[in-house]
Amino acid sequence: MAGTWGLTAADFGAAVAWIAPTYRNSRPLWRFAESRVRGTAADVSRSERVISFPSGGWLGIYSGDNPDAIRGESFDLVILDEAARLAEETWTDAIQPTLADRAGKALLISSPKGKNWFYREWLRGQNGTPGYASFTAPSSANPNPNIKRAAELAKLRVSDRTYRQEWLAEFVDDGGGVFRGVRTVATAESQSGPIPGHYYVFGVDWGRTNDFTVITVVDTSTRSVVHLDRMTGVDWNTQLTRLQTLAARFKPYIIYAESNSMGGPLTEELTRRNVPVQVFNTTNASKRAVIDALALAFERQDIHIIPDPELLSELDAYEVSTSPSGTVTMSAPSGMHDDCVMSLAIAWQACSQGSAFA
């Protein structure tokens, strides 16, 4: 829809900008636009990513991570693709001024991302602000049968919060708890050792002085947390020895250990000690993925945990927030720890992928 509107407007003489959050996001926009004018009288400049028409109109593809390239331009129409992923300053300081000279229009398209500036713009349309109109629809309303099927499968594969935002197009609160139903499944019992015939995995979140190192043991046969070892102010060698001793006791078929400033050297040492360890590479994306999977496990009651007070406290307090730039983060509130949460999330990831290691 956006591409058709933009190219048609340019064909009739309008100056059009089609903007994506990053250069990588903008590449499919360019491929779409270029393919639609192939064989016509339009002039295509791949180096500038601009398509010019005999009418004098043109369409340019831009990326929001380089807002300076937009400044100084004047447009009749600006289309923001995945607008909620753009920084608010890019919209207010760089893009809006480009519409002033020509009394241009803007089309903002996006999945929600919390209740950020895109939400406030959407509300203007809902509240009847002159010059605004806003609409929303779930992915299940898409006529494409593949997308309909994907929307149905997503109900079983992602957390409620993610499903509501990404598939139902709901504006979910920026802040608030991530995990629901935690205490309902806090029914597991601690084990001092393995149960014959059961298989175990570990999740490790490293820490030393300000944070805690936490080792979470999950029984994959019952999908339950059965042991939690939490330590701080302990030297690395002692931590490795405690982990090695715990591994000798439970004999896990895989240990997922977080990769941070010390994660690499520590996992190398564990490998030298013949401990079955794999590195979990911690990025914002991978962290969100394992946290979302853990949240889904709680909602579906697929997991059971021991009623450890520290673990329960961290799970209750863990929250999601959106920065002014639009970055979504999941973490403990200021002054609190999330070491137990991350260790559990990593262990659950190992449990979920257990068939690959068994």
Image: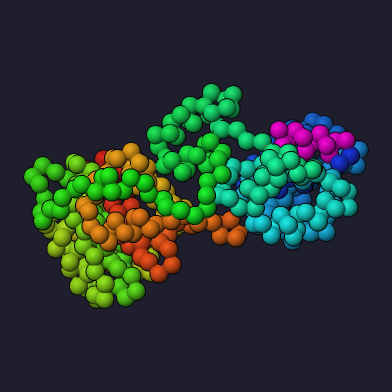
**The N terminus - image quarter:** top right
Q: Identify the residue at horizontal 56%, vertical 48% (top origin).
A: 113
Q: Nearer the viewer, residue 230 or 282?
A: 230
Q: Position of residue 131 (x, y in %)?
A: 79, 42
**The C terminus - image quarter:** top left
Relative to 155, is 76 above or below?
below
Total residue callouts: 0
Q: Position of residue 160 (x, y in %)?
A: 43, 40
Specify whether 147 is left or right of 314: right
Picture quarter containing residue 40?
Answer: top right
Q: Identify the residue at horizontal 18%, vertical 41% (top origin).
A: 221
Picture quarter containing residue 276?
Answer: bottom left
Q: Position of residue 200 (x, y in %)?
A: 19, 49
Can residue 10 be seen from the camera position used here? yes
Specify whether 190 is left or right of 355: left
Check residue 8 for magenta coloring. Answer: yes
Q: Which residues are drawn in magenta?
A: 1-12
Picture quarter containing residue 278?
Answer: bottom left
